[in-house]
Image (cartoon, helix red, strand yellow):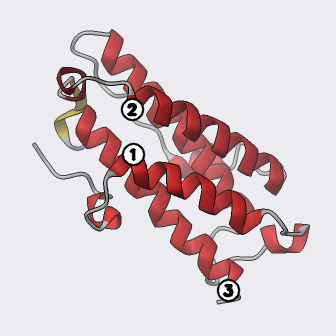
Amino acid sequence: MTTSPYKQDLGGREPLAAMRDTIARIRALTSAWTTSHYERSYAPGKWSARLILTHLAQGEIALGNRARMALTVPNYVVQAYDQDKWIVREPHLAGPDAVAVFAAMAHMNVVLLDSLSPEDRRTPMTHPEFGVVDMNWLIDTIAGHELHHLVQLEQIAAGR
């Protein structure tokens, strides 16, 4: 089984604890932001904070769906999606709304994933790019993905 592409972003942290912490950090980081904060980017040509947050919300929807499908559909094959095609479909979601959707979906996913037994966490699924993976791989991916983008949001907040 391959390693999650976001495993390194976890830095050895327990993924569910990292997810809980990331939700709280994103809420705190953005709590006093104005519209102009949400429109800033961490680098030229990169997504604005608002689009990063929209992408995070979309990711929680997609990856949470993968978890639920794998847990309920034998021999589940993951449906691939193109993040760039998804983001252009929702370009007008307001920053605070993107935070709210991300936080709600991420919390819902943490509650589900935290309830899994060791056997559930070994539930396999087939990913079109990574082959056969399991729920542990998916949990690492979700948590690492959140942390990956948290770094970008922190750079935006710091004015970098």
Q: Which residue is drawn at 47% across and 26% down?
A: 65
Instruction: Using the image, tell me which numbered label, if any, was put on residue 16.
Output: 1
Residue 73 pos. (x, y %): 31, 10
- Considering only vertical position in the picture, is 24 above or below 110? below
Instruction: Using the image, tell me which numbered label, if any, was put on residue 114.
Output: 2
- Whole-number angstrom distance, CA of label 3 to CA of label 2: 32 Å
Earlier sequence position, callout 2 versus callout 1: 1
Residue 79 horizontal side relative to residue 125, left or right: right
At label 2, the amino acid type is Asp
At label 1, the amino acid type is Leu
Would you name the residue on which mark 3 appears? 158
Residue 50 horizontal side relative to residue 137, left or right: right
Tell me if label 2 and label 1 are in contact, CB under 8 Å.
yes
The furthest residue to the bottom? 160
Q: Which residue is drawn at 49% across and 45% down?
A: 82
Out of 51 and 153, give the one closest to the viewer. 153
Mark 3, secondary structure of its residue = loop
Earlier sequence position, callout 3 versus callout 1: 1
